[in-house]
Amino acid sequence: MAYFKNIDRIEYEGAESDNPLAFKYYNPAMYEVLKAGGFTTGGLNFDAKVRRGSFEPIDLVYAHIAGMDAFAKGFKTAYKMLSDGRFGKNIAERYKSYSEGIGKEIVEGRADFNTLSKYALEHDNIVNTSGRQEALESLLNSYILNN
């Protein structure tokens, strides 16, 4: 149901969008909010501004509505992402090297340049693992487009 004439449905614009109302900006934010247990002592610091040729006061109202709609979509998508666990599992796999061995030492601040140099010289057969960025973006897109 449309409440405002001439306001089109906000469509997902993809990861390369430069539109500040694009869903790609809100899903990660809401994912982290929900992962941390939701809002416990505050809320969103939300602002909107008009762009391009929009200069009437009602344009600012539309900007706020569109922005909050994007946050709401981000919230619903983030909830689904947390509920089924696939996204979190993929992220944990991607960054598992930071929870063990030299990666953990780096994160904990226990590895200095000398430690890293020694490690690199002693491990000449280090195998890089793909971060699977495209797969993660595809998974995120599936949540956004199917929610």
Image (cartoon, grey):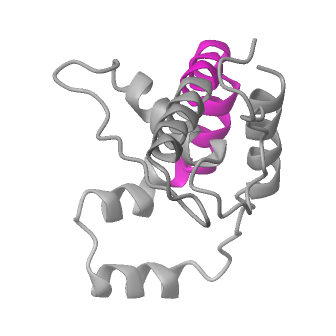
Find residue 39 and report its image quarter: top left
Q: Residue at x 43, y 56 (%)?
A: 101
Magenta segment: does it hold 88? Answer: yes
| The C terminus - image quarter | top right
The percent position of residue 37, horizontal first and vertical second, equals 34, 18
Main SS of residues in magenta: helix
Q: Is residue 93 left or right of residue 31?
A: right
**Left or right: 140, with 91 as reference point:** right
In magenta, the rendered stretch is 74-97
Residue 120 or 131: which is nearer the viewer? 131
Up-down relation of residue 41 to residue 106 (above or below): above
Residue in the picture at 72% in, 34% down: 7
Q: Percent position (x, y) of residue 76?
A: 60, 19
- The image quadrant where one finds the N terminus is top right
Horizontal and vertical percent for residue 73? 62, 26
Given the current orientation, which residue lies at the most extreme front position?
56
In the shown orientation, is residue 40 left or right of residue 128?
A: left
Residue 48 located within the stretch drawn in magenta: no
**Residue 141 x %, y %:** 79, 39
